[in-house]
Image: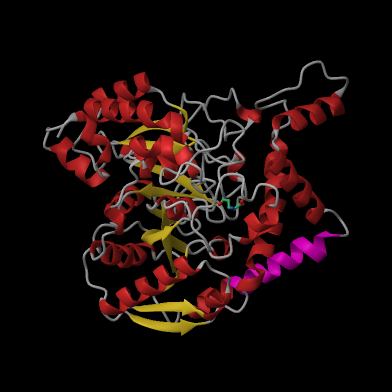
């Protein structure tokens, strides 16, 4: 094992070498840093990297802890004490976190080393990472394509072996969809499973932090660290945290997997549909039973999501007023001018669009017609799932209707971008958990291979079962072993 080989390891593999003292945490950090220096100019996955801080933590790391000495990349929407936390926004360009988000603090308690803050759509609003105010991130499988979003930097870094694993956040698919586009595993925990303390809020009733990793087992390890009640976060659940690795490897015979009629009816790229159909056959061959189910309110989910998420965003982002945080316009002519120019200068176009939409749907006269009605339909969506989970253990669908699209392909038309969230947003609205894992490749017209993601949804707090199902699938297929050949093909890909 040379230092050049280290970044390709999974967390599990690295952990073994660290415990056996065949590799030191310092070597793990240095090797990863070298890889980041090598590939990140093409990828744009990182917004900041603190090598000295990570080396210090590495030298103090206790490798007997569950994640002892393992570097983990953190989406730039989660606070890491002493590090920048920009949310890829001009508004927070110079903001340094005064404290750790609970998810980050828990990683540290488990011995991990937060290393690098990853690129994202500004304030986690987007599906392509193109809304970053700093730079777009690129898909390591095809640099002319998006890595997905909003946790695009986290996904691109893990897929390109420029992170052993990462944290992202998922408000409407932002962990699962980039995981799908980059050919890795992503977990959206049930609402309340992982504390939101220190996660810069986008839509507080939907946001959850979750892992992006090369394997299901790695995600289970990160879930073991970050899940659990937090007295500092009133919506965090008090439920006990299982050891998410225990069920991995148990057979899945007799488990019932639902396929929703309404998902079948949605427009899906034929190569994606074929891969999902093959995956379902594979689950059958492992002894699971495939059952048709119905989620009748699916067609309203995107509309409901973009009303509720923008409403909550408009309230959450009111705090960026140039008084307490971040950017402040210079030489204001009075208070109103101060607010207006600070916010006009600090926020990008998509964030402004959402604040305007959210303010509109909450305004008197429109509140009942939009926001309140959306809340009612949200409840119907929640009931759809509650009913289906009396019949099945999990629901399988594509994670996204298409593989990764080209940079710029959808930027002129936000609606097409929003509509592509059809498979992911219902889980956030219902508060249930979801996993995306690699299930095949589509061929692009250019001849590049683009990963396809399979989504598993489970009832609230049933993450362990989804991981068990995902692991059974992963370990009996080869998809997770495929890696993009980044360094050699970068020039041709961009040509
Ligand atoms: N694509 C969705 C949006 O743009 C989801 C974002 C997220 O999960 N943070 O809002």
Magenta highlight on residue 223: no
Which sits in the foreground, 153 or 258?
153
Q: Indicate the quadrant containing the N terminus: top left, top right, bottom left or bottom right.
A: top left
Relative horizontal placement of residue 1, taking residue 332 as reference (left or right): left
Q: Residue 113 location in percent, x, y?
A: 33, 32
From this viewpoint, is residue 439 visible?
A: yes
Question: In the current view of this chain or complex, which residue is farthest to the top?
Answer: 331
Rendered position, 181 above or below 89: below
Residue at 53% from the left image edge and 61% from the top image edge: 424
Q: Is residue 422 above or below residue 391?
A: above
Residue 241 position, x and y percent, is: 35, 56
Residue in the image at 84% along x and 60% along y: 366
Residue nearest the viewer, comparing 192 with 362: 362
Q: Is residue 370 magenta?
A: yes
At 43% from the left and 78% from the top, the residue drawn is 258
> Residue at 40% of width from left, 68% of height from top?
275
- Residue 103 visible somewhere in the drawing: no
Q: Tell me: residue 474, above or below residue 259.
A: above
- Residue 488 occupies which quadrant of the picture? top left
User: Relative to residue 469, is residue 48 drawn left or right?
Assistant: right
Which quadrant of the figure has residue 180? bottom left
Image colouring: secondary structure
Q: Position of residue 137 (x, y in %)?
A: 51, 38
State which quadrant residue 59 falls in.
top left
Q: Position of residue 435 (x, y in %)?
A: 41, 60
Q: Is residue 256 above or below residue 19?
A: below
Which residue is nearer to you in this view: 332 or 479? 479
Magenta segment main secondary structure = helix
> Is residue 285 toward the left or the right of residue 258 in the image?
left
* Magenta-drawn segment: 366-381
């Amino acid at each position: 094992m040379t230092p050049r080989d280290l970044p390709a390891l999974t967390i599990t593999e690295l952990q073994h070498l660290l415990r056996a003292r065949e590799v030191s945490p310092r070597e793990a950090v240095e090797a990863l840093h070298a890889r980041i220096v090598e590939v990140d100019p093409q990828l744009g996955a990182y917004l900041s990297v603190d090598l000295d801080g990570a080396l210090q933590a590495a030298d103090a790391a206790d490798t007997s802890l569950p994640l002892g000495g393992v570097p983990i990349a953190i989406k730039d929407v989660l606070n890491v004490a002493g590090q920048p936390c920009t949310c890829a926004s001009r508004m927070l360009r110079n903001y340094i976190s005064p404290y750790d988000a609970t998810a980050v603090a828990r990683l540290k308690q488990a011995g991990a080393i937060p290393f690098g803050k990853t690129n994202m759509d500004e304030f986690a609003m987007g599906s392509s990472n193109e809304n970053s105010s700093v730079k777009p991130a690129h898909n390591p499988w095809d640099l002319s394509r998006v890595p997905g979003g909003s946790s695009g930097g986290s996904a691109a870094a893990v897929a390109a072996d420029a992170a052993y694993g990462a944290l992202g956040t998922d408000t409407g698919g932002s962990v699962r969809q980039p995981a799908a586009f980059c050919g890795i595993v992503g977990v959206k925990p049930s609402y309340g499973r992982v504390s939101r303390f220190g996660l810069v809020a986008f839509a507080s009733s939907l946001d959850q932090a979750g892992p992006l990793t090369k394997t299901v087992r790695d995600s289970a390890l990160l879930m073991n660290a970050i899940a659990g009640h937090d007295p500092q976060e009133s919506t965090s659940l008090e439920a006990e945290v299982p050891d998410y690795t225990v069920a991995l490897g148990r057979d899945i015979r007799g488990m019932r997997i639902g396929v929703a009629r309404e998902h079948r009816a949605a427009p899906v790229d034929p190569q994606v549909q074929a891969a999902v159909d093959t995956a379902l056959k594979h689950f059958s061959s492992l002894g699971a039973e495939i059952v048709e189910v119905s989620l009748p309110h699916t067609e309203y989910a995107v509309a409901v999501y973009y009303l509720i998420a923008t409403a909550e965003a408009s309230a959450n982002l009111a705090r960026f007023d140039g008084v307490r945080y971040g950017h402040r316009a210079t030489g204001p002519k009075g208070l109103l001018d101060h607010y207006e120019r600070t916010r006009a200068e600090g926020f990008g176009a998509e964030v402004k669009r959402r604040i305007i939409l959210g303010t509109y749907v909450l305004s008197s006269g429109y509140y009942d017609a939009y926001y309140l009605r959306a809340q009612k339909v949200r409840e119907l969506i929640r009931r759809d799932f509650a009913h289906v989970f009396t019949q099945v253990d999990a629901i399988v669908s594509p994670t996204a209707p298409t593989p990764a699209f080209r940079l710029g392909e959808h930027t002129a038309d936000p609606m097409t971008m929003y509509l592509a969230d059809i498979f992911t947003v219902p889980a956030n609205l219902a508060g249930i958990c979801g996993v995306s894992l690699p299930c095949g490749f589509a061929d692009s017209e250019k001849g590049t291979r683009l990963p396809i993601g399979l989504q598993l949804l489970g009832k609230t707090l049933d993450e362990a079962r989804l991981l068990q199902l995902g692991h059974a699938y992963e370990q009996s297929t080869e998809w997770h072993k495929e890696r993009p050949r980044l360094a050699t093909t970068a020039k041709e890909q961009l040509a």
